[in-house]
Image (cartoon, rainbow, N blue to C red):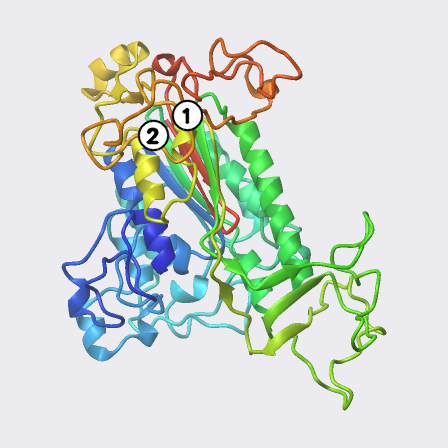
Amino acid sequence: TGCATALMCGVKTNVNTVGVDHRAKFENCIDSYNTHVPSLIDWAQKHDKSTGIVTNTRLTHGTPSALYAHSPSRYWEDDSRMSHNAQIMCKDIARQLIEDKPGRNINVLLGGGRRHLLPEGEEDREERDQRGRRRDGKHLLDEWVHDKKQRSLHAEYVWNKGQFDQINPNRTDYLLGVFGYSHLDFEVDRNKGPSGDPSLMEMTVKAIQILKKNSNGFFLMVEGGRIDHAHHHNNARRALEEVAALDDTIAAAMQQISITDTLIVVTADHSHVITFGGDNTPRGNPITGFDSRVSDVDNKPYTTLLYGNGPGYSHASPSGRHNISSINPLDVNFVQQSAVPRRYETHSGEDVPVYAIGPGSYLFSGTIEQSYIPHAIAYATCMSPDTSHCERPPSDDASAAKTHRHSLVPNFHNMAPSYPNVSPNIYSNNNMNNRPMPASSPVEERKYPDYYSPNQYGGGQNSDPNSGRTPGFNREFGFWSAAVELQPQLILLSLMWLLLLFG
């Protein structure tokens, strides 16, 4: 949640707190009162954009909660883990989602976590042996439905794939889908029938179809959060299957939007202590299988993928490392070996990548802080306080006359070239960095496939196959040269979570 707050709100905070700044102390309700920080969803709603969250974790879990909640404890998903005094003075995360802004105004909410939305004693509709955890007696699912009816909104609540598949995005403006008592199942375990759950890809596509009806645009955060959970169990096969599911999700999302007016940012909140190695391992060797040679120390086989710590540690035999030669490492339940015993594997500390494509993608290059990312997104999509680089598109005149609002789009004609580690100063009213810009500098060359949009970046280069540059790439700006005609959209697709804004 600390990293999620940095990624969603642009502010560093303390471990296990969410949506608050560094002054809030863990589980100190009073401390959190004056430390609330707004998120990308707050900014998007302020600009009349539709908003959504899609996750295969609980909707009240660490990453999604940073977009709508302000809590001194990430563990306050319902009131059952709050002290008596905290219950009187602070709202739990689930209540903030359903009752407060911006949560109650989020158009699409798809994920898991019914247990935090149901009162104690309430039987779960899917897992009949499970009950709600709320001690205050509130039935927040019913409250969500009641609130939308009171406001005469076109809203639907669903809890299985059959109901989800029946939703018509053209007739639905608000959709709440809570498909799991806790987290959703891993993709390889998912019930794909009507009584089961939709996939991350299916949820994302439906969300985009609902949200993109808004002419002012939309913001959608999509999290592939179960990658993390599989790693914690040293279960590399499930982790990789979740990565593949995320890849399918990104591909499907790309079919719903256009990168000529959509900013896509892909990143992660952390890595894991998984290693990838081998000795002359041949091409085509199964990634979850054994290396082609045994250890030159104990003469026992080992897998290509291993972990630095976690439950895979085993010294079951007197001779040391457990011999796994009789175990099938390709089995989905196989647990990779680890160097240090732990009940759960830990995160690791190396930098993680940030990938970007589309309008404003040049802002994401070099080594950056987590908290820079939402400010760069806001700057690229004209949601930041500084809009001096933005302008109203001519096509907006008619709609603005009716609504008395004017949407802004970025005009990057006069922006700096996107050479590495030098980008506009998004934290000041001055569009350019304070450092002097050389008249001619090397540009970070981004090679985008031309089939997405012919000549999407302006006149660009000749189609010389030896030039090392993609035809249509504008070398002077390292970007696109028709910003005035386009309206920015954003997708933040993540290895652990994804964001999407269309506008």
The answer to whether the residue labelled 2 contacts the one labelled 1, judged by CB atoms less than 8 Å apart, is: yes
Residue 450 in which image quadrant:
top right
Q: Nearer the viewer, residue 255 or 380?
A: 380
Residue name at image x 26 percent, y 58 percent: 70
Residue 179: horizontal and vertical position, in percent? 52, 55
Residue 359 badge = 1
> In the picture shown, does residue 200 fall above or below 20?
above
Q: Badge 2, how many Cα within 10 Å: few under 14, some, many 20+?
A: many
- Mark 2 vs mark 1: which is more N-terminal? 1
Q: Is residue 418 left or right of residue 428?
A: right
Residue lying at the far bottom in this picture: please name it: 318
Q: Is residue 225 left or right of residue 432?
A: right
Residue name at image x 45 percent, y 25 percent: 443
Secondary structure, mark 2, is helix
Quarter of the image that includes the N terminus: bottom left
Residue 370: horizontal and vertical position, in percent? 37, 49
Mark 2 lies on residue: 380
Q: Taking the image as drawn, is residue 153 in sight?
A: no
